[in-house]
């Protein structure tokens, strides 16, 4: 039996750009604004794919989630970018920040409760990038971070300021977070003697430049495969082989090989000109060539997320990009809703241009059942306060591991780059209040695009 508008009235209203019908659907009792159709698209995903700005605004008003993803991993903002309407993209960038702020607000009581159950501590961990490209690993960045906790207050010291699309940037930074005011992170640049309060509000200038940035680069989605992974105890010794254990941060940890880990990276370019594509390909060749020749190498990072500070830096100085001409849409609602699941008919948005790169990894992990911090709590802390955002990939991998805290683990980031995270030291200790008070430096813009 074919599907119809009766089964998916919100999607039909979006498809036909019928605001009155969409509002009528949204006002009905029990409606689910995240309902998915036969193509597993939410109404907001469909609105972005078709460039329906008025529908998108209404759906967000009623709770539509901007970071909702299709089965292929594309977000609402991704679909809006490849459609190419500036007004729609700018609206969704602002909405993404607003929703991220709300998520932080909702997280506050949970994180406060979790921290109240922990003793005050200092945690030292190292974050080190590696590549299989010859000679390039020694040129990739590393960082030793120190995380301090007192009551509901946190401080993290780091030397790697950010990992952006085509570079990494060093610094001497401290991040301060009081979990009673979780929507506000204070970042201090000790070298420049300035401090900045990072708030979820963003300037119109940033929204405009972020939109131009997104329209000038590939849309990229990287993810760790969902196929089952398997852990096998590592063995050591020559004649009498035994299960391998190692000491990490003062804890005895069994060491495992992880098999079944595949990193997939997809790129979409239908919104780019041929010149844009050639420029990006040239940059990528230079990156690989630098690693092979022993020259300077930069880190490629293309997973744009609304909460990532480095996106602010990427937006700086980007030339203005106008809206793209709207693609010709010839498909009818019947064509769309009755087409096979996962296969959109011709005439829906732009003609897809996508490439895919897959690479298998065989990382190792050292697990401890005795580590005093619950891993979910620490993952939330690190994702919240860390200056770079690769901890979301750590969460993807860790969530599929058996019980135990990963005191040392390798994480695939890109098809050519992986990161090794090692917790080097943990100690319970009392801290003075002064450690969690930001220095009285002048106000400045550590991450430049936070300015109005």
Image (cartoon, helix red, strand yellow):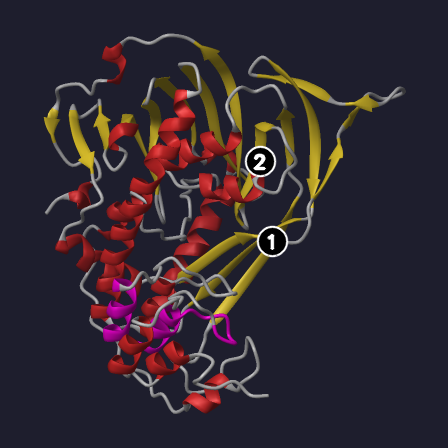
Is 392 on the left or on the right of 176, as rendered? Answer: right
Is 298 on the left or on the right of 451, as rendered? Answer: right
Q: Residue at x 39, y 80 (%)?
A: 9
In the image, residue 222 lies at what x, y percent? 49, 54
Is residue 193 visible in the rendered structure shown here?
Answer: yes
> Mark 1–mark 2 contact, CB under 8 Å?
no
Is 451 placed above or below 249 here?
below
In the image, residue 50 lies at what x, y percent? 34, 78
Asked if residue 43 is among those painted magenta in the image, a careful observer would answer yes
Disc 1 or 2, which lies upstream in sequence?
A: 1
Is 263 on the left or on the right of 84, as rendered? Answer: right
Count neighbours of disc 2 (C-alpha within 10 A) and say few if under 14, some if 14 to 19, many if 20 or more. Answer: many
- 43 or 162: nearer the eye? 43
In the image, residue 210 lies at what x, y percent? 24, 56
Which label sits in the foreground, 1 or 2?
1
Question: Residue 410: which disc?
Answer: 2
Question: Residue 237: which disc?
Answer: none
Question: Residue 225: which disc?
Answer: 1
In the orientation shown, which residue stands out farthest toward the right?
239
In the orientation shown, which residue stands out farthest toward the front?
29
Is 54 placed above or below 411 here?
below
In the image, residue 29 lies at what x, y percent? 35, 68
Q: Main secondary structure of the magenta part?
A: helix
Asked if residue 224 is among those painted magenta in the image, a careful observer would answer no
Count neighbours of disc 1 (C-alpha within 10 A) and say few if under 14, some if 14 to 19, many if 20 or more. Answer: some
Q: Name the element at disc 1.
A: loop
Question: From which residue to which does the magenta span run?
Answer: 37-61
């Amino acid at each position: 039996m074919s599907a119809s508008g009766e089964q998916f009235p919100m999607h039909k209203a979006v498809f036909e750009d019928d605001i009155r019908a969409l509002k009528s659907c949204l006002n009905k009792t029990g409606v689910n604004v995240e309902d998915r159709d036969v193509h597993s698209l939410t109404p907001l995903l469909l609105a972005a794919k078709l460039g329906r700005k008025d529908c998108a605004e209404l759906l967000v008003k009623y709770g539509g989630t901007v970071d909702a993803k299709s089965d292929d991993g594309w977000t609402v903002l991704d679909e809006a970018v490849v459609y190419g309407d500036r007004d729609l993209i700018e609206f969704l960038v602002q909405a993404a920040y607003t929703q991220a702020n709300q998520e932080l607000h909702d997280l506050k009581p949970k994180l406060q409760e979790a921290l109240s159950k922990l003793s005050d501590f200092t945690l030292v961990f190292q974050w080190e990038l590696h590549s299989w490209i010859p000679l390039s690993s020694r040129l990739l960045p590393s960082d030793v971070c120190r995380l301090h906790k007192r009551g509901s207050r946190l401080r993290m010291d780091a030397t790697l300021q950010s990992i952006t699309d085509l570079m990494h940037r060093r610094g001497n930074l401290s991040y301060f977070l009081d979990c009673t005011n979780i929507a506000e992170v204070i970042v201090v640049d000790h070298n420049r003697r300035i401090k900045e309060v990072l708030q979820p509000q963003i300037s119109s200038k940033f929204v405009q430049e972020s939109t131009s940035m997104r329209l000038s680069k590939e849309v990229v989605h990287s993810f760790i495969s969902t196929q089952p992974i398997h852990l096998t105890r590592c063995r050591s010794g020559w004649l009498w082989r035994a299960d391998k254990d190692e000491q990490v941060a003062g804890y005895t940890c069994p060491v495992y090989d992880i098999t079944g880990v595949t990193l997939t990276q997809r790129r979409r370019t239908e919104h780019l000109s041929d010149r844009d594509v050639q420029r990006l390909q040239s940059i990528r060749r230079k990156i690989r060539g630098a690693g092979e020749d022993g020259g300077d190498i930069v880190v490629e990072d293309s997973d744009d997320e609304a909460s990532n500070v480095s996106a602010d830096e990427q937006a700086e100085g980007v030339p203005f990009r106008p809206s793209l001409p709207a693609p010709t849409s010839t498909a009818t609602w019947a064509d769309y809703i009755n087409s096979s699941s996962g296969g959109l008919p011709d005439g829906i948005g732009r003609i897809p241009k996508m490439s895919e790169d897959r690479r298998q990894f065989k990382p190792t992990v050292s697990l401890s059942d005795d580590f005093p911090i619950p891993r979910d709590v620490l993952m939330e802390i690190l994702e919240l306060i860390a200056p770079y955002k690769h901890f979301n990939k750590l969460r993807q991998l860790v969530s599929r591991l058996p019980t135990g805290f990963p005191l040392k683990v390798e994480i695939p980031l890109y098809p050519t780059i992986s990161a090794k995270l090692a917790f080097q030291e943990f100690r319970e200790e009392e801290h003075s209040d002064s450690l969690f008070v930001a220095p009285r430096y002048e106000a400045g813009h550590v991450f430049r695009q936070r300015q109005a």
